[in-house]
Every structure is written in structure tokens, then in C-alpha cells.
Image (tube, grey):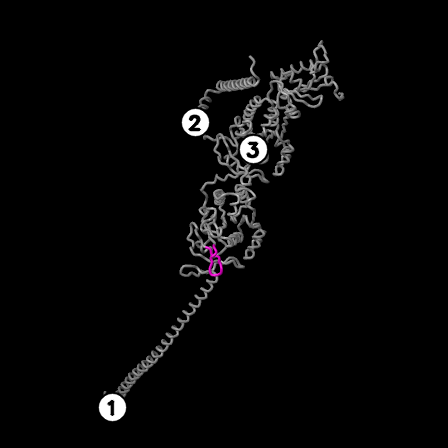
Amino acid sequence: MVYPTAFQSYITNQQERHRKKTFREERVAFLRKLEVDFLPPNAIDKKENSMQTQSPTKKLTGIAKCPTGIRGLDEITDGGLPKGRPTLICGAAGCGKTLLATEFIVRGAGEFNEPGVFMAFEETGKELADNVASLGFDLASLIRHKKVVVDHVRIERSEIEETGEYDLEGLFIRLGAAIDGIGAKRVVLDSIEELFAGLPNQAIVRSELRRLFLWLKDKGVTAVITGEQGEKTLTRHGLEEYISDCVIFLDHRVNNQIATRRLRIVKYRGSAHGTNEYPTLIDQQGLSVLPISSLGLNYPVSSERVSSGIPRLDTMLGGKGYFKGSSILLSGTAGSGKTSIASAFANSVCQSGGRCLYWSSEESPGQIVRDMASIGFDLDRHVRKNLLRFHSIRPTLYGLENHLVVLHKMVTEFRPDALIMDPITNLTAVGNDAEIKGMLTRVIDFLKNEGITAIFTSLTAGGTILEQSEVGVSSLMDAWLLLSMVQSASERNRVLYLLKSRGMDHSNQMREFVLTGNGIELVDVYAGLDTVYTGAARLSQKARDEAEALARRQAEDRRQRDLDMERRSLQTQLDALQTRLANITAEQELGLSQEKLRDDADQRTESQMARARKAD
Amino acid sequence: MSKRKAQQPENDRWQLRLYVAGQTPKSIAAMSNLKRLCETHMAGHYEIEVIDLLKNPKLAAGDQILAIPTLVRKLPAPVKKIIGDLSDEVRTLVGLDVRPAQPPGAIRDSKVMDL
């Protein structure tokens, strides 16, 4: 009976596998028997015992992981790709599949000392090397040092004529030679779907692919296979049927003229993994994934305080300033002084030796430095000492996720003590309120984990209720400083007050502040019955108060003088009486003493006379 | 080896290379099919080289060999590749671009179209 060729090859494969399996089993049984026959009798008992005691105490570990070295990917896969098993990377054209695969190999060879083989079906070795040179990967040098082998497989459909039964053993031999040649532990097949395009017999290709992946597993190499996205399936030719250990999907979407790249782990057998879509960024250092949702609400909290840069504001903040690591919202209408207060904070941080990162979406660094110099903050000095770094960027340059990734990278690289985002309301150009709030939640979570104090300025449109922050983020903030312009008579003056400040007893006073050439000064409060006086009204009130104080002082002085005089007159009277008293006392004493003298004299005379008369 | 333009292609030197991987049934079938084919259509003008990739794996990269068995026609140019065990003779001949030799004794009729 003649079977059709495909079925025939399937049967041969099945028989082959069965034969191998039975042979393997027989070999194992034989060896075991050998062991038992030749070991001394005691050893068997000991071995059995040790095996029994071993299993209850043996700790169950998960599958082994192969770290990729790609920032963020190792975190969301909980250690990396499954070791010794194939992983499928699928996505539309231009998503970064080849880049991911190349980075896997290059970082494996460079950072983890695992040689790798790159079987390229689409690009030549030189093209690959050129493409990744811009990322700083020196593929040529790795090839020279025998850490990486790049094998270009060219399949030209027009050259090939099919004339009977065949298998893809040639591919196996090439791959095997490459792997054994350098002792590779990592293999990339990019992209193996070219086989479907090049070879006419789909059935043979499918069965050989199945055999290939089993063979790769047997070899113990961690394989990464790329495949292009299909219409309704993950890959065009259904590779996901064969590679089911780990599937990663790359996506490249354009939304509102902004393009974002995303990565999603569709499945990962044998391991916990992040299941959401994560934004990814391709830049000068390769691919990076931002594992944003992996941060929980459990971050370390500090009781240290940082000064706001304005001493009297510190007093309003419970006496010492903001909490370290807290998030502060500075909202206000146009021209109310948000950037100035934020710069005061930056200045104070840098002056005490800390580092500050200033993210600006409105003004260029030069403009901010110039403007702040006019109120007495020398930010240029801090920039030169590399304590203050500016990052000015229009929000429409890329999507929200990319802003997040860029911020993440800058913070990780620069390690600032403080961050200022000025203003955040510009981000509405690239996302709606919910998305912005989501992004800010992640930013704040990340910053709190790092213990970085952050100030966010927000522009409230004139005419709206001031206490409604435009993107609804006030609940994320620990402190909210509201700046407003108070109108009185023919002028407007700047006033600030603390709407909330978690964890400290803060002032509830509305304070006027002025931007002077020596910095920001909070002015003394002149409070009336129901309002605080600002500007000219304050000055007039101040004058009035001073006049009143003067009048009171004068009245008091007069009263003092009157009392003084009265006291003096009484004092004189008292003196006169006392003198008379002294006189009388003296006279009395004089009288008494004279009397005594006379008595004495009389007695003496008597005694003399008696002696003279010789009477006694 | 003369490289004169082929006016009668079947008279040129044929250089064929057969890639196999060990002695599998397909490889043996391919070899025997090839020998028979060459004897029939290019008697005396051909040269077959058999390369066993299990012994020399590095040679697979040179000719970009993926399928086994593969027959590569090196000469005359251009290079042609034929995969399979060559059991389909017509397709093999088409692939190699060989004019099949007429069996001896056949009537050459000018009106009959040459294959």
C-alpha cells in the first residue's frame, strides 16, 4: 500500500522516536540492573535509605532561568527565559524581534559568558553586525573571540526543485556544528518562518520543525525563535503550536500620532510572570522594558525632613519642611510663581550637596536658569557642578509610556535626591486624564521606593475652581501647596497656602509672598476680620496699625509721666515727715542722755562731799 | 575543463555534487537514482561527488544546504539545487535542465516537438 509522502515521513518519524525511546529505556534498565548486581549488599540498603530520607527534606525549586540581560525583561519573567527550552518572540514587522534576539545573544556572550549561535534566515552576518553597531554591541569582536557564531542561511525558492522524499537534516547538521564548535548555550533562529516560504512541502517543514525543537531541548540550549505576526494567530505559520514553553509578544501601536512599543508575555510554562502589557523603549543601549506594575504599595518611609528653600515656608510646614521622599503638588494659575518655588527647592537641595533632576516640558534649561537668576537663585553654578540636571522635552515627542521609561532611566542613572516635574499638565497633549494619573501613580511609586522627594507643578486654568487639580492627582500627593493671585483694588498679589500636608501640623494661614531679587520672601500676615490684606492694602493697613501702636505708646507714656510726678511729690512729703521724725527722736534721745548725765553728776558730787566730810 | 558556450548542452562536462548525511534509505535511493539518471542522459560527460555531512559538517554552509539529500549542479552554470531522493525523474531532469537523451532506435521526426 502506497502512503502519501507526508504521512510516510510522519510514520518514519514516529517509528524513529519510538525506537529511540525504547532503546533509551532498555539502556537505563540495563544500567540499573548492573548497579544492583555489582554493588556490595550494604550499599544498596544505605542507598535506599538515603533516597527515602532525601525526598521529604528536598526543597522543590522551579525551572531554571536564563537571564537575558535586557533591562526589565528579567524582572517581569522572574529571572529570565526558561533555560534549555525554546522561547517564541512574535510580533509585527519592525517590532524589535531581531533586536531582542540579538541582544539576548550578545549580552549572553558578553555579560553571562554563555556563547551563542545566531542562525539568520533573513539578514546576512554583516548586515546584522552593522545594525547592532549603533547600540554599542560589537558583534564582530565577539565572533573573532569565538563567543558568537553568526550563520546566514539563504533559501532561494527559485533555485530549489523538489524531486522526492527529503528531510532537513542539513539544517540540524549546520546548527549542531555551530553549537558544538563554540560550546554554545544560547541559540537564536531568526526567523525560521523563511523555511515555509522557501521549501515547497509544508508538511515536511512542519514535522522537521517539531523535530528541531525537540532536538534543541535535548541539546540543552536556550533557544529564541522569532516569528512574524499572523492575521488571527500569533504567528503566520502557527509556530506557537510547537513552541509552547514561553511566548512573548511585541507590539508597536500608533495612537494619536504617537507610537508606543509594548511587550506582553503571552505564556510562560512553569513560572510566575508579569501578565500585563509593558511599555518598551529602544534606545542607544538596546531594548528596555519597564516593569511598572511590579511595584506594590509597600515602600520604606522616612521621617527626615528637607527644607523647601524658603525658611518661612518651612515654618508653615510643621517647622521643618517637607518629608523626605514625599510628593508635593504645586498648583496655581498662570504666573503665580510655581516654577519659582520649585526652583527654590532645587536650589536648596543643591546647596546642601544633594542632586536634583529638573524635568521641564515648558521651558528650556537656559530660560529657567536665566529667569531664576533674576530672583537670586544661581542655578547655573549647580549645573556646572553636576548637581542639577535639566531635562527639557516637549510632551508630544513620544507617548506617556516612553516618558515614563525615559524618566525611569534618567533617575536610575543620575540617582538624584529630588525631582521636579514642571508642569505635569502639559501631558494632556499625549493622554487623557486617566492615563496621566496612571503614569503619575507609577512615577510616584517608583520615586517613593527610591526615597526621592518630588515636586509636581500643575497649571490650573484661570476661572476654574482652584481646588480642583486638573488631572485629578491630588490624592497621590502628600502635600499640596496652592498658589493663587488675590485681587484687591487695582492690583493682584501672590498668595500661597497649604491645602494639605500629610503627617505634620501645618499652618492654615494664607500667606502673601513676593519674588524679590534675593529670593522668595513670605511677608508678615496682616489679617483683618475676614480676610488677609495683600499688596497696597497691606501697606496701608500696616501704616494704620503702626500709627495706632504709636498713639497707644504715647498715651501710655503720658500716664507713666503723671504717675511719676505723683510719686515724686508723695516721696517729698514722706521725706519731710521722716526728717521731723528723726528730729524728734534725736531730741528725745538728747533729753534722756542729759538727764542721765545730770543724775550722774549729782551722785558724784554727793559721794565727793561725803568723802570730804568723812561721813561714810 | 573547456568553458565554451553550450550549443549542445548535453555534451558539456557535468559536475554534480550530492550531499547526504550518513547511509539512510533516502541517501541510498538518491545515489542509485542519480547514477541511473546520469548513465541514461549524460553518459560519459558527468562527474558525481558525494559529500557526507556527518563527516564534514562545515561544508553544509558553503552551498547553503538545508535539506538532505540535496543535489547541486555545479557545472554547467548556473548553480541549481535539487532536494529529495530524486525518485521523480521528470522533475529531476527539469531541475537539472537536462535534455533527456532519445532512446536508441527512435524515429526522429522533424515534425515531432523536441522535449
Tell me the chief SS of the magenta region: strand
Which is closer to the viewer, label 1 or label 3?
A: 3
Kind of residue indicated by mark 3: Ala
Q: Is residue B51 magenta?
A: no
Quadrant the N terminus of chain A occupies:
top right
Instruction: Name the chain letter of the residue that bears numbered label 1.
Output: A
CB of mark 2 within 8 Å of CB of mark 3?
Answer: no
Q: Which residue is mark 2?
A: A53
Quadrant the C terminus of chain A occupies:
bottom left
Q: Is residue A486 magenta?
A: yes
Tell me which residue sits at (71%, 21%) in the image.
B75
Which is closer to the viewer, label 2 or label 3?
A: 3
Instruction: Name the chain letter of the residue that bears numbered label 2.
Output: A
Residue A423 place in picture, x, y as percent: 52, 49
Which is closer to the viewer, label 2 or label 1?
A: 2
User: Would you identify the image quadrant in which residue B78 lies?
Assistant: top right
The span shown in magenta is: A484-496
